[in-house]
Amino acid sequence: MTLAATELAFRAASVALLLVLAASLLSGFRHVLAARLGAAFALGSAAHAASYSVGVTSLIPAWHAPLIALSTGNIVVFWLFTRALFDDEFRLRGWHGLVWALVTAFSFAGCVWIAPGGHARFSVTIVNLIVLGFIALAIGQTVASWPADLVERRRRVRVFIVCTAALYGGLNAALQIVVAGSDVGAVADAINTGVLAGVVAAIACAMMRVDGADLFPASAAAPAVLARPAPVDESADQRLIDALMRLMADERIYRQENITIGVLAGRLKIPEYRLRRLINQRLGYRNFNVFLNNHRIEEAKAALADPAQAEVPVITIAMDAGFQSLGPFNRAFKAVTGVTPTEYRRLKAAVAPGIPVAT
């Protein structure tokens, strides 16, 4: 088999596998934002597999330009995918689409006007610095969100997906900056397409080894809590649960700023992995932050319903319960109760007319 045929085979295999992966995600989890973004990322990666070459000269085939632009914009999709993958409460905003459009448009302009105008190195360098920036954001998001995930298999697979994709993308971006404007030959392209095919296959295999319902929770409203927690039989686990509930109910440890599962495990004098498994398998939570927020919201609900605290501002109640700002409190409260804190207070005050309500 010639080098060109080998490269074509690798590209075709990558594109085919990515298209199957995108179709699978949309078929089984199209109502889950993380799955939809994962499918979009797979499609953008297919565009990358079809169009990518190591080293860029000023002459870019016309049919390559849209694919290269989509491939570049795909780094924004990757960043959004990592956010949705690790944050069950993440929602897309209009400015996310604007960022994607700007990155894609700049890449297209680089292919059509900037590089042909004799500034190929400038165009490639800027584009790949943007890529490296979004990869850094994705890694930062992963590092920040990973400890709160309580589903052990999902934690490992999520990190593997993000790190593998980020490593490949980062090395490619750095390589493009180094060799920008030069033609490094067909061998480099064949090696790159082979590595890409291996990366795609590894990610697909990793995803197949995990229950899709674990990786992409089906419910958007309450994705982090299992419907039926497993019954507690072991006396040792029951004692730990009792101790944990005392910390939450009596000491209200959830009020502490930046409380982590490691701190909580230290208070209980058990390994972190055991507490993670206990909260997940025995109490039914998928995410540690949701576990904390549910306790905070219960305290806030009691305060909002208390006539004696009718004039206490909502933000004061939120801060007292352990929230750091009003926005996250409002979103978490509405996700649990279906109404805003102010609406909840007014509903409770309706049974006791004449009491002023603070907002």
Image (spheres, grey):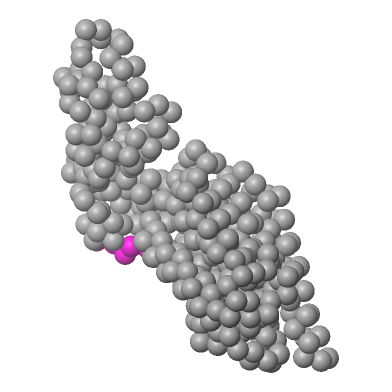
Where does the image place residue 69, in percent across and percent down from the top left?
A: 62, 65
Q: Is residue 206 left or right of residue 11?
A: left
Number of numbered tags placed on the structure image: 0
Q: Residue furthest top?
A: 353
Q: Which of these two is toward me, 259 or 284?
A: 259
Q: Which of these two is toward me, 1 or 278?
A: 1
Q: Is residue 22 left or right of residue 281?
A: right
Q: Is residue 299 left or right of residue 289?
A: left
Residue depicted at 78% across the width and 80% down the height: 8
Res. 207 image quadrant: bottom right
Quarter of the picture containing the C terminus is top left
Residue depicted at 50% across the width and 45% down the height: 94
Where does the image place residue 6, in percent across and percent down from the top left?
A: 77, 86
Res. 149 image quadrant: bottom left
Quarter of the picture containing the N terminus is bottom right
Residue depicted at 31% across the width and 57% down the height: 261
Q: Is residue 226 visible?
A: no
Give, as a single range, the part of the protein colored magenta: 269-274
Where does the image place residue 102, in percent across and percent down from the top left?
A: 53, 58
Q: Is residue 272 magenta?
A: yes
Q: Is residue 303 visible?
A: yes
Res. 72 image quadrant: bottom right
Where does the image place residue 228, in percent across and percent down from the top left?
A: 50, 40
Residue 75, compared with residue 300, is above or below; it is: below
Q: Is residue 273 magenta?
A: yes
